[in-house]
């Protein structure tokens, strides 16, 4: 994107200026151009229902940006004393999902998140953020551990979807996803889910059944990727931008549809440009929702969680007489 190109040019000029060249005027011009571009493309003031001029496909590209903060970045900045837990006690340890215990604003919590890689080597290790069945079973094991001790659960979701390979199918990926969804509806502790990047298909939903579902402004959340949707509906994956607009997969759309509870504003140009701002905004939202949920009796918590998801969607009852 043009943001990154301008930033690269500015950084190159700064490096050259260290060698004695006076490039301050050129740097200032590029910085002014970058600031003006940000003001033109993104509304400067966030609101409870953020509305920006960014196209849905542009948001898809921002959600996938390789410099965007990932789960481990959020854990490092938002929590203290994080202790990672490994393995599903059945098959192995899936590095595409990070789980553990941590302290958040003085409260012990369970953290579960999908993790992508920053380079080719780490992406192979993390399987590009696409968990296997053992990853979801590890997540459930740790969430049940948190339930046993009364620790709230915070999930951070950034995945194109669960891994669709043969090995995952052999180890029952569908069953692992279904089991997580079922158990999350019955977990007797507060659950807050946050879509921080990509929220793809059942791989995201298996970590997103929460009392509160938050979503970063430039994240996406959908039953299928735009490319997959375009390939099925239009027989042409190059029509992904058109599919993205039809899917209503961005945060402002999903807030209006009642699928999520709050949009977390990002700085102009995306979370990767000023990650500290995004981290601070998300921290405030998590703390606020956690305080509200911890005050609720368990019975009310579970009932509201069920009702929240049961109210989603639109349906019509057909009179029995019309079926005869």
Image: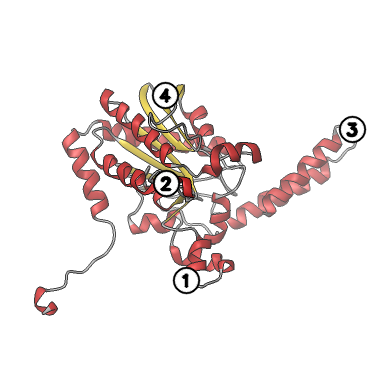
Numbered tag placed on residue 19 in the rendering: 3
Residue under pointer 2:
170
Sequence-first tag of 4 and 1: 4
Mark 2 vs mark 3, CA separation in Å: 59 Å
Sequence-first tag of 3 and 1: 3
Q: Is residue 4 above or below residue 142?
A: below
Quadrant in the picture for residue 18: top right
Mark 4 element type: strand
Mark 2 vs mark 1, CA separation in Å: 28 Å
Residue 237 spot, x, y in % from top left? 56, 66
Q: Is residue 163 visible?
A: no
Asked if disc 2 and disc 4 are in contact, CB closer than 8 Å, the reply is: no
Asked if disc 2 and disc 3 are in contact, CB closer than 8 Å, the reply is: no
Q: How many marks overall?
A: 4
Q: Is residue 304 left or right of residue 67?
A: left
Numbered tag placed on residue 102 in the rendering: 4
Residue 114 spot, x, y in % from top left? 47, 39
Sequence-first tag of 2 and 4: 4
Asked if disc 2 and disc 1 are in contact, CB closer than 8 Å, the reply is: no
Mark 3 closeness class: few <14, some 14–19, many ≥20 residues within 10 Å: few
Residue under pointer 1:
233
Numbered tag placed on residue 279 in the rendering: none
- Nearer to us of marks 2 and 4 is 2
Asked if disc 4 and disc 1 are in contact, CB closer than 8 Å, the reply is: no
Mark 3 vs mark 4, CA separation in Å: 45 Å
Quadrant of image for the N terminus: bottom right
Asked if disc 3 and disc 1 are in contact, CB closer than 8 Å, the reply is: no
Q: Is residue 162 visible?
A: yes
Residue in the picture at 54% in, 50% down: 63
- Nearer to us of marks 4 and 1 is 1
Residue in the picture at 36% in, 27% down: 109
Mark 2 element type: helix
């Amino acid at each position: 994107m043009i943001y990154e190109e301008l930033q690269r040019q500015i950084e190159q000029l700064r490096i050259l200026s260290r060698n004695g060249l006076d490039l301050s005027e050129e740097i200032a011009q590029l910085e002014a151009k970058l600031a003006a571009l940000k003001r033109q493309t993104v509304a400067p003031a966030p609101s409870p229902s953020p509305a920006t001029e960014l196209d849905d496909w542009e948001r898809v590209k921002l959600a996938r940006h390789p410099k965007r903060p990932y789960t481990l970045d959020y854990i490092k900045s938002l929590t203290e004393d994080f202790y990672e837990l490994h393995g599903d006690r059945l098959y192995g340890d899936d590095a595409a999902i990070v789980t553990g215990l941590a302290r958040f604003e003085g409260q012990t919590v369970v953290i579960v998140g999908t993790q992508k890689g920053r380079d080719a080597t780490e992406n192979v290790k993390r399987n590009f953020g696409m968990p296997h069945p053992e990853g979801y079973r590890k997540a459930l094991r740790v969430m049940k551990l948190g339930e046993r001790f009364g620790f709230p659960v915070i999930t951070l979701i950034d995945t194109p979807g669960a891994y669709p390979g043969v090995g995952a199918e052999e180890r029952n990926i569908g069953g692992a996803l279904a089991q997580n969804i079922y158990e999350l509806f019955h977990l007797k502790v507060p659950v807050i889910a946050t879509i921080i990047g990509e929220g793809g298909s059942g791989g995201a939903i298996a970590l997103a059944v929460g009392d509160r579902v938050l979503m970063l402004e430039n994240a996406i959340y959908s039953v299928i990727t735009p490319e997959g949707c375009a390939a099925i509906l239009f027989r042409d994956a190059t029509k992904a931008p058109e599919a993205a607009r039809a899917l209503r997969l961005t945060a402002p759309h999903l807030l209006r549809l009642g699928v999520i509870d709050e949009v977390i504003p990002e700085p102009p140009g995306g979370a990767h440009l000023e990650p500290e701002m995004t981290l601070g905004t998300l921290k405030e939202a998590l703390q606020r929702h956690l305080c509200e949920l911890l005050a609720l009796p368990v019975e009310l918590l579970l009932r509201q969680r069920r009702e929240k998801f049961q109210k989603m969607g639109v349906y019509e009852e057909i009179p029995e007489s019309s079926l005869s």
